[in-house]
Amino acid sequence: MPARRTSVPEARKRVSTLLREWGAAQQVRDDVELVVTELFTNAVRHTDSEKVGCEITLVGAHIRIEITDEGGPCVSAPHARPGTLDQEGGRGLLLVCALSESWGTRPDDSGRGQVVWADLPYQTAAH
């Protein structure tokens, strides 16, 4: 998707539609949408990317989210910063940490950008 702020809600919408098709529980959909929003926004704001990739896969009892950027000259791996609740920004990765069982980064296949991934627990909706 284009690396623009307007792509963030579109990524969230696509992920939500897919999770609904998979029969994911509402809490799973909410958590995954929030993590996708935070990671996609970071890729748009903090890289020189023209495009940002967003992929989710179901791996056993987990949802794997992968956001891929194209990097930039001064891009470093994201890290959660301690802060206070009254700060204007910087809490996104703290939310990712809180909602994910694990998360991290790795170089993308081109070696220029990076993939930020997160694993969240998966449950289907109760019938």
Image: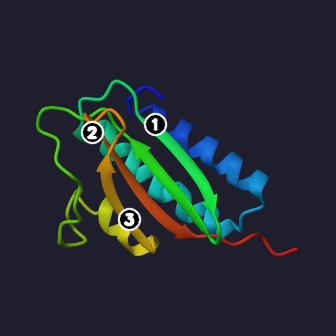
| Residue 46 rendering spot, x and y as whole percentages | 23, 40
Secondary structure of the residue carrying numbered label 2: helix
The residue lying toward the viewer, choosing from 45 and 60, is 60
Q: Are marks 2 and 1 in contact (CB under 8 Å)?
A: no
Amino acid type at circle 3 is Trp
Left or right placement of residue 1 versus residue 114 in this view = right
Q: Are marks 3 and 1 in contact (CB under 8 Å)?
A: no
**Which of the labelled discs sits on residue 103, or is there none?**
3
Of the residues under marks 3 and 2, which one precedes in the sequence? 2
| Residue 54 rendering spot, x and y as whole percentages | 49, 42
2 vs 1, front mark: 1
Vertical placement of residue 73 versus 14, above or below? above
3 vs 2, front mark: 3
| Residue 73 rendering spot, x and y as whole percentages | 12, 32
**Which of the labelled discs sits on residue 3, or is there none?**
none
Q: From the image, tell me which residue sits under label 2.
A: 45
Q: Going by the picture, which residue comes out furthest to the left?
A: 74
Q: CA distance from mark 2 to mark 1?
A: 14 Å
Q: From the image, tell me which residue sits under label 1.
A: 53
Q: CA distance from mark 3 to mark 2?
A: 19 Å
Q: At 39% from the left edge and 27% from the top edge, which residue is drawn? A: 51
Amino acid type at circle 1 is Gly
Answer few, some or many: residues within 10 Å of disc 1's Cα (few below 14, many 20 plus, some between 14 and 19): some
Amino acid type at circle 2 is Arg
Answer few, some or many: residues within 10 Å of disc 2's Cα (few below 14, many 20 plus, some between 14 and 19): few
Of the residues under marks 2 and 1, which one precedes in the sequence? 2
The quadrant of the image that shows the C terminus is: bottom right
Secondary structure of the residue carrying numbered label 1: strand
